[in-house]
Image (cartoon, rainbow, N blue to C red):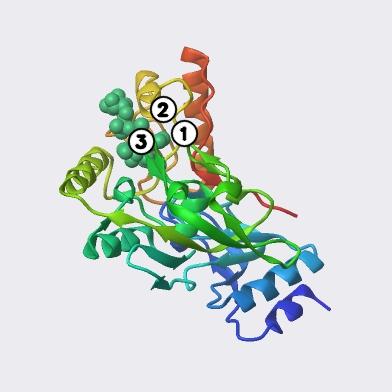
Amino acid sequence: MAFRNLIQALPNLDIKENWPLAPLCTLRTGGEAEFFVAPDSIESIKNLYALALKENYPLYILGGGSNVLFPDGLVKGIFISTLNLNSLEWRTNLTADVDAGFKLSTLLKEIRERGLAGLEFAAGIPGTLGGALSGNAGAGDHGVCELVDYVICLLPDGEIRTLNHDEISYGYRRSSLAEGKKIILSARMTFRQATPKDKDVLENFLLRRGSQPHGLHNAGCTFKNPPGNFSAGKLLDDSGCKNLCVGDAVVSDVHANFILNRGHAASADVLKLIELCAERVYERTGIKLEPEIKIFRKES
Ligand code: EPU
């Protein structure tokens, strides 16, 4: 049977076909997803994952789309958004179960309203908890993974596995949760009682974010800071990358680690610009910058 018939036959799912990808990411670039679906139950995600594996069909998982670059053109495969898996339940005064599609900004607001703290470093970071966990999003030395007691994932064999904090390895903008084709479903997170100092810490993070570009579509920092106490933004700036452009993709003149879409940029333009910037820094310093943006490649 054609794959289209198989996927459309799955129960309780609203499968969209040839669905535009640009509105699903903050950069507003990319082509069309052959199939797009935003399930609201774990059962549905399990069914989709099992079908994709059985039929050897490409599968892409999306969170808030704030740190991604999609391919241009028609992309064969199923794009699954976790945005409809978005509940939060408090288990104790300090501990909550948070779904992968829950927005990080809403989580920060919620814990502050309860007089809790621990997530201040995430101030101004867009996206969902699932995306944040897979890349250990954060600022300074802090990342979201440090706050989890455990994470519940769907594994390729269909098993739902609870990974305890000490079973997850993570570091600067990386976590083992992104490996092995797991789908992050939810996490148990523990916060702490806030102190007056936490407000200052939060404001300080917001202040630093304030020196980054606002307004135009972008995907946050393009590159990771390389090891050795270097700042990617400064390296790019010193290498003359500000204002470099390919088509409508342009390097911000406010912060050189941001690429902006000033109109109708294609993902190919952004990719070219990423390469161009990395080349410039490499030629001047010998440092190889690694993209922080998650670049989706077409699978066959
Ligand atoms: N700088 C320049 N020129 C530029 C950009 C930066 O000289 O064009 C200098 C700044 O003046 C500063 C230094 O470089 O002295 C570092 O810049 P910044 O304070 O903006 O910090 P960053 O290392 O570039 C990191 C995270 C950001 C996070 C900020 C604030 C990375 C790659 N970036 O930026 O995260 O918002 O700290 O906490 O780790 C993101 O993850 O998408 C992101 C933007």
Between circles 3 and 1, the one closer to the viewer is 3
Between circles 3 and 2, the one closer to the viewer is 3
Instruction: Note whether 153 is above or below 216 in the view shown.
Output: below
Q: Mark 3 belongs to which amino acid?
A: Gly
Q: Is mark 2 within 8 Å of ligand 1?
A: yes
Q: Does the residue labelled 3 lie within 8 Å of ligand 1?
A: yes
Q: Are marks 3 and 2 in contact (CB under 8 Å)?
A: no
Q: How far across and how far down the image is residue 194, in percent?
A: 23, 53
Instruction: Note whether 284 is above or below 243 in the view shown.
Output: above
Q: Residue beneath label 2, please? A: 232
How far apart, in angstroms, are the residues tagged by discs 3 and 1? 12 Å
How far apart, in angstroms, are the residues tagged by discs 3 and 2? 13 Å
**Residue, x 46% and y 52% (percent of image)?**
132
Q: How far across and how far down the image is residue 257, in percent?
A: 38, 34
10 Å neighbourhood of mark 2: few (<14), some, or many (≥20)? many
Q: How far across and how far down the image is residue 87, in percent?
A: 43, 73
Is residue 271 left or right of 142 when viewed as pictured? right
Please say whether residue 42 is visible from this viewpoint.
Answer: yes
Q: Mark 1 belongs to which amino acid?
A: Lys
Q: Residue beneath label 3, please? A: 140
**Residue, x 60% and y 78% (percent of image)?**
15
Mark 2 lies on a secondary structure that is helix
Foreground of the two, 36 or 263? 36
Please say whether residue 128 is visible from this viewpoint.
Answer: no
Tag on residue 193? none
Q: Residue beneath label 1, please? A: 224
Is residue 280 left or right of 104 when viewed as pictured? right
Q: Do the residues labelled 2 and 1 touch (CB within 8 Å)?
A: yes
